Amino acid sequence: MSWTAALQEALKDGLGQRVSLASGDLAGHAHDEGVPFTSTPGAVVFAQSEADIVATLAVAREFGIPVTPWGAGTSLEGAVLPAPGGISLDLGALDSISDLDPVGFTVRVGPGVRRVALNRRLRPHGLFFPVDPGADATLGGMAATNASGTTTVRYGGMRENVMTLRVALMDGRVLDLGSLARKSSSGYALKQLLIGSEGTLGVITSLTLRLHPLPPATVSAQLAFPDLAAAVSASVALRGLGLTPERLEFVDADTVAAVNRHRARHDPELPTLWVELAGRDTADAEAGLSLLREVATDTGGQVVGEARTPEAQGNLWAARHGVYDALRAAWPGHATRIGDICVPLSALAETVAFMTRTLAQHSLTAPLVGHIGDGNLHLLMHAPPEDAGAWARIDHALHDIALYALSVGGTCTGEHGVGLRKRVYMREEHGEALDLMRDIKTLFDPQNLLNPGKVVGELD
Amino acid sequence: MSWTAALQEALKDGLGQRVSLASGDLAGHAHDEGVPFTSTPGAVVFAQSEADIVATLAVAREFGIPVTPWGAGTSLEGAVLPAPGGISLDLGALDSISDLDPVGFTVRVGPGVRRVALNRRLRPHGLFFPVDPGADATLGGMAATNASGTTTVRYGGMRENVMTLRVALMDGRVLDLGSLARKSSSGYALKQLLIGSEGTLGVITSLTLRLHPLPPATVSAQLAFPDLAAAVSASVALRGLGLTPERLEFVDADTVAAVNRHRARHDPELPTLWVELAGRDTADAEAGLSLLREVATDTGGQVVGEARTPEAQGNLWAARHGVYDALRAAWPGHATRIGDICVPLSALAETVAFMTRTLAQHSLTAPLVGHIGDGNLHLLMHAPPEDAGAWARIDHALHDIALYALSVGGTCTGEHGVGLRKRVYMREEHGEALDLMRDIKTLFDPQNLLNPGKVVGELD
């Protein structure tokens, strides 16, 4: 990458003050929230408009400079790390929210709109956008990663909730993909191809989202089980009884114990499920809760907490949401690396058993949390940043676990994406389909300038 | 297409008795259920295995002969019409059902398995596959068309309910796409690209489907409204109250009248909704029904029928399901052509008003039925097969309506696919994205032998 005077001049010509070479801006775009190393861009473009995106791609094409889109920097697998010396294309300022349609249940957003701000705007209309990956990510980044989270068991992830994408391609075209109709059988699903492509095929310049009505009433319950298999049985039984929870979250016994210590709580230190049920009204939600109590009893578990008001629900869920803080308190100074696999529901119990054995083999401990209705499991690995031996063991354990997920028909990433770090599993997971993915990458980006090396890139 | 001795020999070499050149077999694969003209293949291959599919594609490649996959022949836009003299690749015998996983909620099927047979096998397990396009289509054909139908408002269409696809490519590769995990952020969404590609990118050799528990209890209601706008308001209000119907179907007033005449019924001849609600138990379903009654009153409608037992529900839904028969009885000897557009919910009422005006302008009458929760509208156009003037008016009206759907942000096909007949809308609907679709077609099938001319093909 050579930042010649001609390149700088071309960028500034089209983009003026939106181009920054200031060291603080470069450093701020040199890392994400998951990968320990940094990769410093040569410039940051703070796009204010779609035209700025197109202009940036044109300069990149002319000078052969890589471009990596940047949302909120909350990726965990290196998806937003720039190519060293390349351009970090910051889309955060493209944060308009418009065209709210309360009858069609849609809203249009810029790629830089953040999830929490969007839901604040939607709430007075009785609507919300359900996809909740935890981080206050941008909607553009969430679409690019096919993000999902706690509510996916009920509402699906980004793939099911993006109606349209407007995408700038490397060759200068700007395409509108999808439609405002709730379904279509018209043409190839390019929108779906772009969702989850992590900025390697095009840059999202705006998107239309599918909204949902806020549930009229909700209740939450916390359930303790003798083992994970019982918790899985309970979640399957719930579905058979016609209950689809809004959220269905799992935490292992050791983690409940850690949160108890951190928050001075006294929750039973057993494998624990948190369930949120919605209803037409309070009575309906309560009826769901009674059924949930029966299911717990039938599967050897017990309800250890119930909550109805927003405050009580906040308190009940605190133990689930407090996992990360408890980890930080228990291991001050440790860095974390979050594992993310997804397996068939029928393989959940054996997968957790494998995880437990693998951690023990490598002398590791790590909180386990799971979006159990989807089969999506996270291990919160942690060690002192400088403890190379511990990180090697962590890498080894996560590697074994990813391969195990593939061996039972699952995937190496349920929701965090591939980025740089999970490229190593692409051949094992996709076989010869990886070659076709690479052909598609070449079709969209023949110079390999758009977030190069990510997802389907060759290993270094 | 030249059926040289060498070509015949090559096919018979690999496929023996599974190759038919019998005129009855050729004629049986020369038409679908929607397009009035026929296109006769040069041979039919009755595949018995994936190896037969691969062998057929190899011969096609060697001799430059087009291949069009065939499921049950129920397509409506010409998707299964063979290239004249090409091979019709009949997948109907690939009808195995295996790997039923009642915990993971999945089952593996051959592409030739039919929807009704699958649900018969699933019922004893308390499970079902919800996608219901009406016709007893094959699951392979449904995936290839991204089919949907009456239950899509609740469960999604094929796109949301196919977990894995195994696909034979034109170049001889057989790829496994997707995984048994309920979600994934791993790699490009090739599975989604294949769904809805109507056999133009690859041939589906097997697929894994996402299953759902049969609802413990259901009730159905029939509601009459003064106009469609009121019916739309009711359906939006239902969702705001936390009710997601299993089915939500609309029929216009004239059509109710036609069914009344045909079946000696006395249903109010008004715009009518049929709603099916599920519940945890009978009381729960009844509570939903009471809310539905309130919604009807609030929006100016009335409940005109309720049904609880399977028999009563069958009778209640008969008026909805009797539309096609009533049409045939009212217009004996007429052929039909079914329009299929999908629009944003907020544009439904104006779209139906446009349809009504357009029919009147062209001196046509046609029953209107809609999957109203999805914004998907069908007009059942009909005329004597030989009445060229009427068919020209029908073509004109459907053309105006398709363009109208696009003008309000909708799609030219909600669920029937593009086939031959809707290619004319691809440029208007997809703009420059159509060029990219064509590039993808060339990447998968450089010789243009796989169902050539369909979906993204140039107009003749």
Image: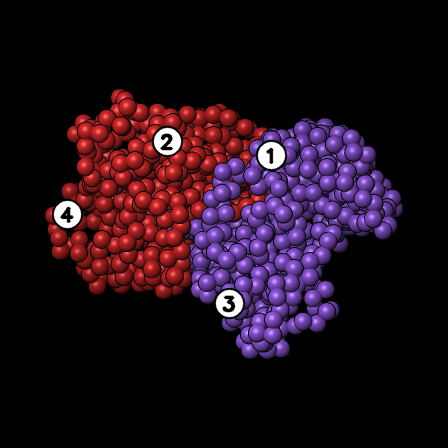
Chain colours: A red, B purple
Distance in Å between CA atoms under marks 3 and 4: 61 Å
The numbered mark 2 sits on a residue in which chain? A
Coordinates of residue A76 in the picture (x, y in percent)? 28, 44
Label 2 neighbour load within 10 Å: few <14, some 14-19, many 20+: many
Q: Residues within 10 Å of mark 1 (few under 14, many from 20)?
A: many
Reading the image, the residue beneath label 2 is: A54
Q: Is residue A51 above or below residue A345?
A: above
Inspect the image, locate mark 2, and give the three-letter code of the amino acid beneath it.
Val
The amino acid beneath tag 4 is Pro
Q: Amino acid at mark 1?
A: Leu
Q: Quadrant of residue B53?
A: bottom right
Q: Are marks 3 and 4 on the same chain?
A: no
Question: Are the residues tagged 1 and 3 within 8 Å (C-beta)?
Answer: no
For label 3, the residue is B62
Q: Position of residue A200 (x, y in %)?
A: 35, 44
Quarter residue A35 falls in: top left
Same subunit under labels 2 and 1? no
| Residue located beneath label 4 in the image | A384
The subunit carrying tag 4 is A
Secondary structure beneath label 4: loop
Residue B256 lies in quadrant: top right
Nearest to N terminus: mark 1 or mark 3: 3
Quadrant location of the N terminus of chain B in the rendered image: bottom right
Q: Disc 2 or disc 3, which is closer to the eye?
A: 3
Question: Looking at the image, do the residues carrying marks 3 and 4 touch, with CB atoms under 8 Å apart?
Answer: no
User: Depth-wise, is mark 1 or mark 3 nearer the camera?
Assistant: 3
User: Which label number is shown at residue B406?
Assistant: 1
